Image (spheres, rainbow, N blue to C red):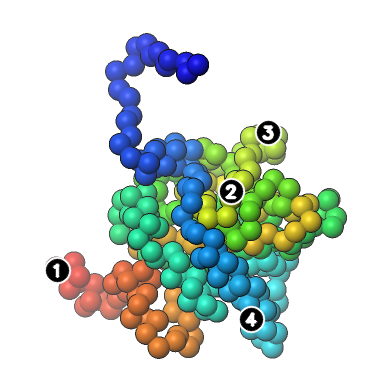
Amino acid sequence: MKREMKLSGIKHQHHNNSKLDAYKEEFDRKGCVIVKNVFDQEQIASLQRAYDAAIVENLNFYKNKNVEMSKKEMGIIRQIYRYDELFIESVVKKEITDLVDRFIDDDWIITQQNGSHVDENKNPNGDSVGVQVWHRDFVFRHITTSKPLMINILIPLDKFTKENGATNILPYSHLFPEFPSKEFVTDNLDYAEADLGDIVVLNGLTYHSAGQNLGGMNRRSFNTVFAVPAIRHQVEPFPEHPKDDFIKKYEKFLTAGYSNNPSLLEFIQERNA
Ligand SMILES: O=C(O)CCC(=O)C(=O)O
């Protein structure tokens, strides 16, 4: 039997008119939401193949570079769309851009897109490959905002389960500037358990961490960060050697016409426009 909801002393109540409204309400209140069935199995299979190839290409890329890779960098494929356009193509489809338009409610650009995989952890007390550090994607910011300035969308390329390292999320943490105590985190974290085809959407201020993978299988995903254009790109947005019409196709999503460093005259002209 469905229990009737009774209210008392409430003059204002939020109402949703569509499924997207309902997702947005959950996102606004909790700082996170899992949106179901955004990708079909064929799209996921292509992304899985592209991801496996990107792991190899990424290792090759760093092989002869004189750069020290910290442990925290393991399991991350920075600017994954450099290796395959499919990654950026898959997040600029209407279903995703409509959601981002709605959730950010402002101009936005893609400031980062990183692969993130957590390999099986053979040592339950230690870390394995993967970003198992608590953080906000809006890094170093101990603030709250009345509207999201940044959101990030994690796309699972393997089913996310508690056992295989589903992202650990601290719901409502976008509403508090500081990171809570160890006890609070342990008692209140949620596991973003998601099926293939689902996407995990977080406010850029929501604290999260990749989970420990004790599940006997690797867990792949990629994370795209969308932010108002006042926020910098993590790295120069265009790959060193972009393929044919990459810039033409994706400039709109990567810069939205905002130049990172307008000249003084361009700046004044933009203000007059
Ligand atoms: O892979 C994950 O579960 C989390 C990834 C992540 O935290 C990030 O890309 O910012």
Q: For the residue labelled by badge 1, is the local secondary structure a helix, a strand or a loop? A: loop
Q: Residue at x 63, y 77 (%)?
A: 53
Q: Horizontal and vertical percent for residue 86?
A: 48, 73
Q: In which quarter of the image is ligand 1?
A: bottom right
Residue identifier under label 4: 57
Between 73 and 130, which is closer to the camera in this rendering?
Answer: 130
- State how far apart marks 1 and 4 are (Cα): 44 Å
- State how far apart marks 2 and 4 are (Cα): 27 Å
Q: Horizontal and vertical percent for residue 114?
A: 55, 67
- State how far apart marks 3 and 4 are (Cα): 39 Å
Q: Of marks 2 and 3, which one's residue comes earlier in the chain? A: 3
Residue identifier under label 1: 273
Q: Residues within 10 Å of mark 4 (few under 14, many from 20)?
A: some
Q: For the residue labelled by badge 4, is the local secondary structure a helix, a strand or a loop? A: helix
Tell me the kind of residue under disc 1.
Ala
Q: How many labels does the image show?
A: 4
Tell me, yes or no, whether the two marked residues, 3 and 4, touch with CB atoms within 8 Å: no
- State how far apart marks 1 and 3 are (Cα): 52 Å
Q: Which mark is residue 194?
A: 2
Q: Residue at x 37, y 85 (%)?
A: 245
Q: Nearer the viewer, mark 1 or mark 4?
A: 4
Residue at far top of view: 8
Instruction: Determine whether, in the image, residue 55 is placed left or right of residue 29.
Output: right
Q: Residue at x 44, y 38 (%)?
A: 26
- State how far apart marks 1 and 2 are (Cα): 45 Å
Q: Nearer the viewer, mark 2 or mark 4?
A: 2
Q: Residue 187 carries which label?
A: 3
